[in-house]
Image (cartoon, grey):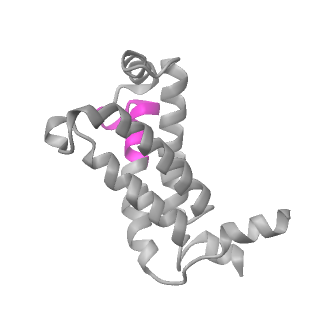
Amino acid sequence: MKNTLLKHFFVQNQSWAPLVIRVPLGIILMAHGAQKLFGWFGGYGLEGTGQWLASVGFEPGYVMALLAGSAEFFGGLALILGLLTRPAAIVTAFTMLMAMTVHIGNGLFVSNNGYEFALILLAASVSLAISGAGKLSVDSVVKR
């Protein structure tokens, strides 16, 4: 059972297409995670992000900021490397689903603080959860 589950994580589509999604998605997620965790790129860090998350109903805010930031930063890093791509994509997809709940009341467009950005990140994450890492990935090397 354990071997079968591990093999499933590493079996993947052997095309280049996932790489084209993995790398930019990973960069975007890592940058957003770095804003939340470290306050980089104009972010508010754990304390500020935690206060904001608590204000929109995600309690305890600091813990939620740590979870969201870690999912984005480390999930993004895993996607860039193509390391445990399916689990990383599932975690980032869930995180984007939660992000959508914050913005859903504002409609689709990001110009109105809507959910379109989270939606496209969710779709890309789900795509990678289905396809796997593809060529040029740590998963591909591990599989061999």
Query: Residues in magenta?
Result: 30-42
Query: Left or right: where does residue 103 sit relative to residue 89?
Result: left
Depth check: give the residue in front, 77 or 109: 109
Q: Does the magenta stretch include residue 39?
A: yes
Tally the marks: 0
Depth check: give the residue in front, 100 or 68: 100
- Which quadrant holds the N terminus? bottom right
Query: Left or right: where does residue 110 sit relative to residue 92?
Result: left
The quadrant where residue 11 appears: bottom right
| Residue beneath the point at 53% across and 17% down | 60
Above/below status of 124 relative to 56: below
Give how far across and how far down residue 101 sits, in percent: 37, 35
Give how far across and how far down residue 113 sits, in percent: 20, 35
Above/below status of 55 relative to 43: above
| Residue beneath the point at 25% across and 48% down | 116
The quadrant where residue 44 appears: top left
Q: Look at the magenta stretch and give its main secondary structure.
A: helix
Depth check: give the residue in front, 108 or 134: 108
- Which quadrant holds the C terminus? bottom right
Query: Left or right: where does residue 116 sit relative to residue 99?
Result: left
Q: Single out the residue that lies furthest toward the left.
A: 111
Above/below status of 141 relative to 106: below
Give how far across and how far down residue 34 sits, in percent: 42, 39
Give how far across and how far down residue 23 sits, in percent: 41, 64
| Residue beneath the point at 66% across and 77% down | 141
Above/below status of 21 relative to 48: below
| Residue beneath the point at 45% across and 58% down | 125
